[in-house]
Every structure is written in structure tokens, then in C-alpha cells.
Amino acid sequence: MAKTKTPQAVRGTQDIFGPDAERFNHVVETFDRVRKLYGFKPVILPVFEDTQVFSRSLGETTDVVSKEMYSFPDRGGDSLTLRPEFTAGIARAYLSNGWQQYAPLKLAAHGPLFRYERPQKGRYRQFHQIDAEILGAAEPQADVELLVMADQLLKELGIADGVTLTLNTLGDAASRDAWRAALVEHFRGAADSLSEDSRRRLEANPLRILDSKDPQDRPIADSAPGIDDYLTAEAQDFFGAVTAGLDAAGVAWTRNARLVRGLDYYRHTAFEFVTDRLGAQGTVLAGGRYDGLVESLGGPPTPGVGWAAGIERLAMLLPDRTYAPGLDAAIVPLDDQSIADAYRIARDLRGQWNSVELFATGKVKKRMARANDAGALIAVIIGESERAAGQVMVKDMATGEQALTDPADLGDIVAKAQNVRWLQSAGAAGLPDIDDEAWPDFDLPVDPDGN
Ligand code: ATP
Ligand code: MG
């Protein structure tokens, strides 16, 4: 009989497991903590939309729409697209549901996105983003708040060093049109040296040439005029308010007068947090203001500003440490008669918000070895003699010490062990010494008084 081939994941998709999965979750959890500090509300939206939601808002000539979308007719014949980004779907939901009534509305989302790209390190066909948007806020304070939040997120993740905020303004419509004309003139003069893709962009979307990753285009893009000479007074004021706000909030930034974003809808503020630690995939978080987007979907004029960051890229930058939550207690029943006690103790400890695993199968030696490998703070061992005494054996996994204990004391023992672990990790992280007296010692209750 022919052996069937082991199935493989689709090119450009990943099965994330082990430490990588812990890092991924750490990014999402940290984002979820930080967005609450700024009052951003969670929103959960469909993974696919009518194709038009993306083609109308991102622009037909953008790379995403022209070459990267996963579009397909469904069984009813409608053209659907797996979302390649969050903003268009969020703007669509804002209109569909009449969320104008909540404006200004601060939203946070995360989840999978799909783009048909050439897979490489840090670039996938299914990838994941965290995303933050403010809809219905025209003032530069919204841009500042989003950037301050992004800055804090990177600091909380421990990756702010080596990641730089580069900032630009694309001005208002008048500034952008004037700059566009100057860019077309500059690029026309050098058209022969541009890549084929960029020669095509020259007519349709000249700003995109600035963003080209083709080395052939870089010298011509880097010598292109910046936007400053074309900014209207209003656009200058807006940008001045954003940069003054960042300075006041202590967020470091650098100016790049040629920074543009890949999608058509950007106005005024555009920014990227970049690093040289990820090779060609150096942009970790990016966004800007998109005041024309909701209108392009058929809605009323609605200002908006937001950013998105690749979870995989952030996770790759995380400092090298374990992100797995430690196990508090390993419960090891030594015989079948002890399993009922093990279940009860596990339930009680978990009810007190401790992480607990049971090691109740295989040979006794194996059970202890697995409890050890799991990195538990304590093991709770229950066998015939413990049952007879109405007690359990507690083992301090760090020192190997053990003692017979009343099961009712287990919660306190775990709490003390957690304090010790916390103090040790705080010490290792170089935090200032903490007054030892303020903390109970982690001593097993071996003395006859039971203290
Ligand atoms: P790039 O210039 O790297 O192609 P982009 O400008 O297309 O990025 P955005 O659409 O702004 O990216 O998405 C925001 C963030 O999402 C990026 O900064 C990056 O961290 C992440 N990202 C974008 N595309 C991918 C992908 N194919 N795989 C992994 N992460 C991605
Ligand atoms: Mg891209």
C-alpha cells in the first residue's frame, strides 16, 4: 500500500509552538495591558470582507491590492478577500454600525492578516498584527497619543533600545499634490535608471517609489525632494503640534522627509518604528493619519489615525528569556488510591489562582522526573503513608527539602515560594534591594508549632 505523504503547512504559513508561541502570546498580552492604560476598546472583526472594502480604501495601484490580496469568489459568487490589514475593515465596521455616535472612538484589535508575498524571515503569507486606531479625531493630540502608546509598548516589551521612531508628514491634499508633481519631475529625469516596477509607479503612484525596496531605485529615491518645501501653513502647524507633543511626552523621534507609507489613504502624520536587527524586514510598527479613508468607502468625511505592528517581528526582538508562566505546584500521587486527593488539592490550589499540573501516570520515578522538568516551585506528593496521616509531603524543588504538611497550608506555602522566586528574579533584573523584613521567609512548616 502506498504511504500517504505527511501533510505540510501551506508556504508562508507557520505553526507556532513552544518558546515562539510564548513570545507571541507575551506580545499580545502586553499590548492588551498597555491599550487599557490609554482607554482603547477591544474590537473583534471578520477575517474576510467584500473585496471592495480593501480595493476602494487602499487604492487599486498599491502593492497590497494589485499583487498581494487573497481574493476568491465564494459559493454564492461574491468576491471576498482575506483581510490584508485592519484599518479598512475597522472603517467599514464604523460605517456599518453607526459608531459615529461614539466618536472619537479608540479601538484595539489583533489577529491574522493575509498577503501573497515572497516568504522569508519576518515576512509571511499569514502573519499577525496588533492594531490601534482612533476614529473621528481630527486633532494632532490623537496622533501624539497613539505614538506615546506605541513607545510605551516597545518599552514594556523591553525592545525600545535599537528601535527608532522615524516620522514624516504627508501634508494635506494641497501639500501632497504639490509634492507629488515635484516627485514626478524628479523621477522622470531618472526614469531610465528606475526598476521596471517603479517606472510603472511613475504614472500611477509616484510616492510609492520612495518606499521601493529595490536597490536599483534607492539612490534615485534617496535624492528625491523631501516634502518640506511643499507644505502648506496648516500642514506645517499640524506637524509642529505632533512633534511638540512627542517632545513634551519624552518620545524620541527622527525626521525622514521622504518617508511614505505603502497605502494611498495616508495624510499628515506618517511614521515607522524601524530597527536594523531584522535585516530587510526592519519595520516593526507603522502607521499614520488617514483622513480620506472613510469617505473612500462611501461614508461622511471622518478623520482617523492609527498604527499596526507585526506580532512575529516584535516577538523576534524580545530579549532572550523565558516567557512561559512558571508552574507553581506539581501534584504527584504515588498510587491510584491517592488520585482523588490529588484532584481535590489541584482544584483548591487552582481556585486560589495557582498554576498546577498533575503527574499521575507512568512509573513513580518517571512522575517525579516529569514534575522536576516542568519547573514547579513545589511538588506535592501523596502516597499510602501520607493518606494514613491525613497529610501530604511537600518538596521544595529548589532546595530538595521536604516535609509533611497539612493540605490546608498548601496555598500559603505556594505564596511564599512565589515571593522567593519573585525576589530572585527582581535581583537578577538588577532591581534595588528590597527590605527582607517586609517579606515572609519561605520556610517549610517543619517546626512543631506549625509556623
Ligand atoms: P513592509 O514594508 O515590511 O512590507 P508594510 O509597510 O507592508 O511592511 P504595513 O502594511 O504597514 O507593512 O503593516 C504593519 C506591520 O505589519 C509591518 O511593519 C510589519 O511589522 C508587519 N507586516 C507587514 N507585512 C508582513 C508580512 N508579510 N509578514 C510579517 N509581518 C508583516
Ligand atoms: Mg509590505
Image: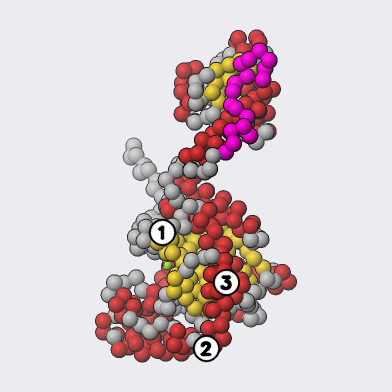
Q: Is label 2 or label 3 in front?
A: 3
Q: CA gap, disc 1 to disc 3?
A: 22 Å
Q: 150 or 50, which is in the foreground?
A: 150
Q: Residues within 10 Å of mark 2 (few under 14, many from 20)?
A: some
Query: Quick one: which residue is furthest to the left in this view?
Result: 193
Q: Does 271 sit above or below residue 11?
A: below
Decide which of 299, 183 is in the foreground and name it. 183
Find residue 328 and report its horizontal and vertical position in percent: 57, 31
Residue 275 appears in which quarter of the rendering?
bottom left
Q: Is residue 80 visible?
A: no
* Label 1 Cα neighbours within 10 Å, binned few <14 / some 14-19 / many ≥20: few
- Asked if 399 appears above or below 234 in the picture, the reply is above
* Residue that extends furthest to the right in the rendered view of this protein: 101
Say which of 272 and 52 sits in front.
Answer: 272
Q: Which mark is residue 245?
A: 3
From this view, report whether residue 119 is shown above or below residue 181: above
Q: Identify the element where label 2 is drawn.
A: loop
Q: Amino acid at mark 1?
A: Gly
User: Magenta stretch containing residue 198, yes or no?
Assistant: no
For the point 53% across and 83% down, the residue is: 236
Taking the image as four quarters, which one is ligand 1 found in?
bottom left
Q: Could you say whether the residue bearing mark 3 is in a helix, strand or loop?
A: helix
Magenta stretch prevailing secondary structure: loop
Sooner in the amino-acid sequence: mark 1 or mark 3: 1
Q: Which residue is mark 1?
A: 162
